[in-house]
Amino acid sequence: MSIQDIIQGKKEWRAHVARVKALPQDYQIVYKEIQKYLFKVGPVELTEGTGLLSGIVDLFEEGAAVGKGVLDVTGRDVAAFCDDLIKDSKTYADIYQESVNQEMNKAMKKATDK
């Protein structure tokens, strides 16, 4: 990653944050909770720019523009909304599970080869 990539990434993030701050208060609150949830659950693609998060802001901007409340957009179960967004995404938990299985298989093979 070059210095230019880092600078560009920071510019994109600042623009993204400005869009979030322009949302109505209820949308900002729910967005921040979604962001925390996604950072904890860890879809791998979150480290590749603001794509997923920008899509959420797009959806929120559209909802706010037509006068919908944020929970009319996401539904009352915001965690389920998030899970649905990332259901086909690889997460860090998936990667860890794969590594655990690989290590277990190596250890079992080593133990049985003796």
Image (cartoon, rainbow, N blue to C red):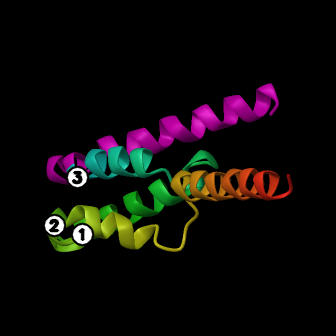
Task: Report x, y in % for residue 2.
Answer: 82, 30
State the SS at label 2. Answer: helix
Residue type marked 2: Leu
Residue type marked 3: Val
Q: Say which residue appears at 30% left-offset and 41% top-offset.
A: 21
CB within 8 Å, label 1 to label 2: yes
Task: Report x, y in % for residue 56.
Answer: 39, 61
Q: Quadrant of residue 76?
A: bottom left
Q: Say which residue appears at 22% left-offset and 52% top-offset.
A: 30
Q: Is residue 85 left or right of residue 103?
A: left
**Outermost residue toward the right in this view:** 113
Where is mark 1, residue-wise? 74
Task: Report x, y in % for residue 58.
Answer: 41, 63
Q: CA distance from mark 3 to mark 2?
A: 8 Å
Where is mark 2, residue-wise? 71
Out of 96 and 24, give the one closest to the viewer: 96
Q: Is residue 104 left or right of residue 20?
A: right
| Mark 3 Cα-neighbour bin, 10 Å: few <14, some 14–19, many ≥20 | some
State the SS at label 3. Answer: helix
Where is mark 3, residue-wise? 30
Q: CA distance from mark 1 to mark 3?
A: 9 Å
Q: CA distance from mark 1 to mark 2?
A: 5 Å
Span of residues in magenta: 1-29
Q: Is residue 34 left or right of residue 5?
A: left
Is 114 magenta? The answer is no
